[in-house]
Amino acid sequence: MSTTGTIYAPIASREPPRAAQGAVAWVRRNLFDGWANSLATLVTVAVLLWLVPPLFGWSVLNAVARPDNAACRALQETGACWGVIAEKGRLILFGRYPFEEQWRPLLACAALIALLIASCLRPFWKPWLAALWVVVLALCFMLMRGGVAGLTLVETSRWGGFPLTLALSVVSLVVAFPLAILVALGRNSNLPAIRAVCVLYVELIRGVPLISVLFMASFMFPLFMPQGTSIDVLVRVLVGMTLFAAAYLAEVVRGGLQALPKGQVEAAQSLGLTYWQTQRKIVLPQALRLVVPAIVNSFISTFKDTSLVTIVSLYDLTGALQLALGDADWRKFFLEGQLFVAAVYFVFCFALSRYSRWVEAYLNTGMRRQ
Amino acid sequence: MTANMNSEAPIIEFDKVNKWYGQFHVLRDIQLTVPKGERIVICGPSGSGKSTLIRCINRLEEHQSGRLVVNGTELTDDVKAVDAVRREVGMVFQQFNLFPHLTVLENLTLAPMWVGKMPKKEAEEKAMQQLTRVRIAEQAGKYPLQLSGGQQQRVAIARALCLTPKIMLFDEPTSALDPEMINEVLEVMVDLAKQGITMLCVTHEMGFARQAADRVIFMDQGQIVEENTPVDFFNHPKSDRAKDFLSKILSH
């Protein structure tokens, strides 16, 4: 052995140094940490001082909440006329659906929202949930359309407002998601024919704006059908929206498939799992969790894209707003109506994005070293 | 199909097997017969085709010419034949390839339940036996990424054993491990070798080869260059290429 070695005494572990505590220290560290940070803080405060008081005055202090047209007009745009929502709210929310029957879409929406919330919760992730979806969607459709069980018939062309927005987005996403998974798997398939069909589908749909797809679905589709058969315009639009959403989602899912290490599939194959077992048990659970944020992004964007159905004469939430403010007395208060509609969209989109954060955290269990 | 009735028949037989990646001739006229229960170590320089060779045995790679018969079944495009072979062949990978979204126990029960149609309870009992065998039973509820590399590779070995394969393939099982974890994996492999299972192992661990292998196969540029008993191969390599290779891995 060498005689030149050195031994060092063991060093016990110590606490890390503590950061300064208290409000002043916090402010200094977060708001005035260097000249650039201080400048940003001052500019932000100035902008807030400039914007907030007039906004607050317009929307709260000077606002009229009663559905009183004369009082609203007297405001001369110095305050918001929330009365327009009290007056026209039901028309905005339910569109041209017969006034005295509006409990039906209300009930259908409540059922659908309850089902959506249930589907978001872990204890409900059971095989029967899929069956429940089919049942609830069918019941909602019968309730809305009527013509059975003593309910008067309401043609789908008269459906509108929030129920239409919800139905379009929920149905098209529920159908589009599994379709997207199949298309994504198809694009990665070893069989050239399947691959070609999937590529063609995705590239064709992605290459056209949704408005064109909706036009084609509602005006061109019937040209190819035998004379005398007519498909409901709502169904045609749903098919269009579903195909559109599925093409985008398929690319998102494919991104997840691409990110999965090749060794995962090889391990599954070496254990004798079949193609579908491998996809279901190994590939998709991992690939999908990688792209949760992008999937939610697609969902949100589809939800808002439903507003484009106005161009084929379906009156979703935004379309119903145009209808509701058609009369001369209230037309002036379009801004308040838009803010109301925007708030409805925001509540749903924000809830969805918060939920996706939870899903990410939930699915990441065990995926990171701890 | 009568071959697997006869216990004297080889369990793996390569007959003039060739494979190309594009223009690159990666396996050249491979001729190899493995009797049941033999333990073979395959070594050779990087890119010599040794991984490709064992990956052909469970058809993670397809050969393009020649005949390859495993456990009495010839490997062809027939999916049923491939499935039948994979059920009898376990594989351990360099990068472990555990399923990170499943717990250790779920990694082990997956194939018995879905491929072997075993009831969950029975699959779990069997999985726990295998985990005990690789001395890691107390980690059953953890996720793979919570374990050390050596532990993960032992779980991977247990997973491959859960379908009670007749053949075990090891593709550089210790190459991705930190040095202090190599021995715990080799010990498990030596135990396994003693139990009479047919083993083909791509590795440069000479200690393991001397201790557990019946035969060493040296490959270079897609062909089998030399084969011998471990002691003779390491002490008296005959070919220049083997001498050159051994001098490189032994120089430090």
Image (cartoon, coloured by chain):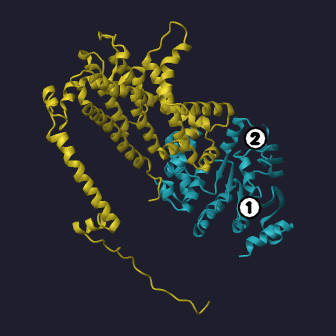
Chain colours: A yellow, B cyan
The number of numbered discs placed on residues in the rendered structure image is 2
Residue depicted at x 54% and y 60%: B151
Circles 2 and 1 on the same chain:
yes
Task: Look at the numbered discs 2 and 1 and tell me whether their residues touch, using CB distance below 8 Å.
Answer: no
Which residue is identified by label 1?
B46
The disc label shown at residue B226, or none: none
Quadrant (top left, top right, bottom left, bottom right) of the N terminus of chain A = bottom right
Q: Is residue A223 visible?
A: yes
- Give x and y (percent) for residue B128: 52, 51
Instruction: Please state which amino acid type lies under the numbered disc 1.
Output: Ser
Does A67 sit above or below residue B18? above
Q: How packed is label 2: few (under 14 Cα within 10 Å), some, or many (20 or more)?
A: many
In which quadrant of the rendered view does residue A348 lie?
Answer: top left
- Give x and y (percent) for residue B85: 70, 42
Q: Is residue B133 visible?
A: no
The disc label shown at residue B75, or none: 2
The Cα–Cα distance between marks 2 and 1, rounded to whole angstroms, is 26 Å
Q: Residue furthest top?
A: A228
Q: How packed is label 1: few (under 14 Cα within 10 Å), some, or many (20 or more)?
A: few
Front position in the image: B232 or A247:
A247
Front position in the image: B176 or B131:
B176
Does B195 sit above or below residue A118? below
